[in-house]
Amino acid sequence: MRRQLRSSLLVVALAALMLGQGGTPLENPRVRRLGDQLACLCGCGSSITSCNMLHCHFSEPARKKLLSLVNAGESDSNILAAFVLEYGQQVLLKPPSEGFNLLGWLMPFIAIAAGLALVWWLIRRFRRPLAAVAGPEPDPALMAQIEKDLDNLDS
């Protein structure tokens, strides 16, 4: 009986220690929300919460760091600023729309507008009627012969 009590206490103590670890970072909804804004820099092109590489050298430590910052009570902007400070602007999936990044947001629309303007110009250019080529006046005797030949064809 005493042995059974001791082993059940040991199991309860181990379970309490495991629960005290905080679980995996992805169980926290705030970590998932913030992690979806941060790019995984392993080369997969995913966010740190959706990176599915086994033992990813970037996303696993980034998730743990993100969980520790969330548990420390940091604000969302401070957490994102800490990641930008450590890894640079490329860690953000959506870079801020200011400075050179603004050009990246605007360039697709500028390219579409330029393409439409080019198509419009080409259509206008090639739809113009061609100017008649001015040449020498035809010989009246030759024109009379042509008229005579045409009249002979009709009869």
Image: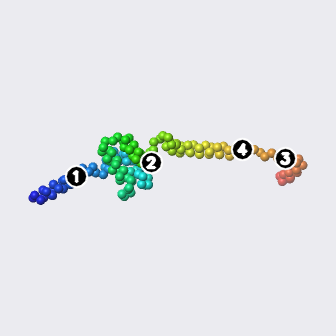
Which marked residue is nearer to the observer: mark 4 or mark 2? 2
Mark carried by residue 17:
1
Which mark identifies residue 136?
Answer: 3
On the question of residue 125 being in view, the answer is yes
| Residue type, numbered disc 1 | Leu
Q: Earlier in the sequence, mark 4 or mark 2?
A: 2
- In whole angstroms, how far apart are the C-alphas of marks 1 and 4? 87 Å
Q: Quadrant of the N terminus?
A: bottom left
Q: Which residue is mark 2?
A: 90
How much space separates mark 4 and mark 2, taking CA atoms?
54 Å
Residue matched to label 4 = 129
> Which residue occupies 36% across, 45% down?
33
Q: Quadrant of residue 121?
A: top right
The local crowd at label 3, few if under 14, some if 14 to 19, many if 20 or more residues have their Cα within 10 Å, is few
Label 3 and label 1: CA atoms lie apart by 105 Å
Foreground pick, 142 / 69: 69
- Residue extending farthest to the right is 141
